[in-house]
Image (tube, grey):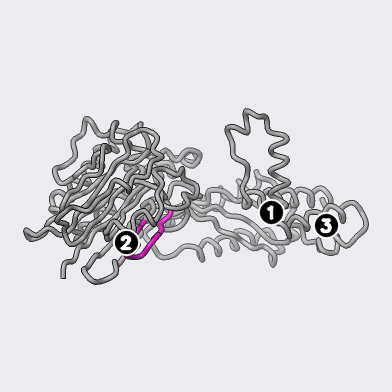
Amino acid sequence: MPRVTFIHTADIHLDTPFKGLSEIDADLADRLRQSTFQAFRRVVDLCLREPADFLLIAGDTFDGETRSLSAQLGFAEELGRLAEAGIPVYLTFGNHDPADDWLREIPLPGNVHCFSPARPETVTFSKDGRPLADIHGLSFDGGKSADNPVLLFRKTEDPAPFSIGLLHATVGPAGPHAPYSPFAVDDVMDKGFDYWALGHVHKQRIVRQADPAIVYPGNPQGRDFGEPGLKGCCRVVLETGRQPVISVIPTCAIRFETVSVDLSDIEALTEVPDKIEEAIGDSNPATEADCLTRVVLRGRTPLHQHLSKEEDLSDLARRMNELRAGTRFYHIDRIESETLPDIDLAAVARGNDFPAEVFRTIRGYDDNPAESSRLIQSLAGEFATPGIRKEISLPDEEACRRIMALAQRQLIDLFFP
């Protein structure tokens, strides 16, 4: 039975600047700067360890037009390791590293095929002298791409046992990403392909398991707290007559995690650091990845008034990081407080005074998120100038929920100092 094993990665974003995070301290800045390179090195290590038949890279190898010499040299060197092992690499360009402005001075090894942005082209992978997989690829050309790219893909007249599509595009909802080169699942159902290797969406997602498989591997290294958890690439096995076997393999060097700490049962400030350490420990699986953690304090607690000053929380984070120096890297990026004073808000809302009326109103919005969103969007539209409204989007329902929660905490502090 024909069988092929390959690694699918995308959105490596070498040279990511980590703005706002890399300015915290020198050690963290260096770790963050190296993390995207370490993650890609782990992808290459995986190819060699399997060994994989080939590696697919579905766009956005670099983060932008400015690419350091070390990043370009490092990328070429890693691909050279695969060349020495006889492992081909099939690569498309994405919207962050368009084909018209890419690696002009540093040639890639001969095992690398870069797909054209002009039209889909096909390269056949052969093993033991027999064609095994046709890889059909298309790159981003540097312009705005709103066209449906998969309409241009066709199987060859004499196809290999497996047909694979490789491109940087959006299928279905794009989430926080721009809807680049959008297409629908129905657009590929009659193409006869076995696997669509996609890039652009940074969250790992198997859009469709088989007939055909449609997969986003996610990025191999998260870049901020909006990309939390273990990040990695996909190991894929295609075998005639069987469903694809798709495994997500962690590769990230640093994980981004947000940890919630409930202080409802805490009465002494001296207990807070231990409670935070316990929560961080519970959130960290046994992996090779270091962790950058954001801590959110929650719950009704008599300590609320002591945890409301940003400078005090910053001092606490700094002290905890200093005490952890020399141990495994679990850096606390920030401690935020969403605690509430230890009062019965339900009892307050049953009163007849002004605070009671305020909290009854807030509770009404809590029970009706859609109405809460309408209120906040109405206020945003009223107070924002036309110029600002053109540049920013109105908050979504989750953002509205956070705004209402923050407003409630601030009102509680005003009424019950």
As drawn, the residue found furthest toward the left would be 129
Residue at (84, 52) in percent of width and height: 358
Amino acid under disc 2 = Pro
For label 1, the SS is helix
Q: Residues within 10 Å of mark 3 (few under 14, many from 20)?
A: some
Separation (CA) of disc 1 from disc 2: 38 Å
Q: Nearer the viewer, mark 1 or mark 2?
A: 2
The residue wearing badge 3 is 360
Inter-mark Cα distance, 1 to 3: 17 Å
- Work out whether residue 233 or residue 16 is closer to the camera in this orientation and state it: 233
Which residues are drawn in magenta? 203-215
Front position in the image: 383 or 191: 191
**Compared with residue 34, is residue 242 higher up or lower down, i.e. above or below?**
below
Residue farthest right in this picture? 352
* Count of numbered circles on the image: 3
Please state the horizontal and vertical placement of residue 40, each as a whole percent of the image: 30, 49
Nearest to viewer (mark 1 / mark 3): 1
Contact, mark 1 vs mark 2 (Cβ under 8 Å)? no
CA gap, disc 3 to disc 2? 52 Å
| Picture residue at 59% right of the left edge, 39% below the top | 393
Q: Secondary structure at mark 3?
A: helix
Q: Is residue 169 magenta?
A: no
Mark 3: which amino acid? Arg
Contact between marks 3 and 2 (CB within 8 A): the answer is: no
Identify residue for label 1.
370
Sequence-first tag of 1 and 2: 2
> Where does the image place residue 148, in percent across and percent down from the top left?
37, 45
Q: Nearer the N terminus, badge 1 or badge 3?
A: 3
Left or right placement of residue 55 versus residue 220 in this view? left
- The numbered mark at residue 212 is 2
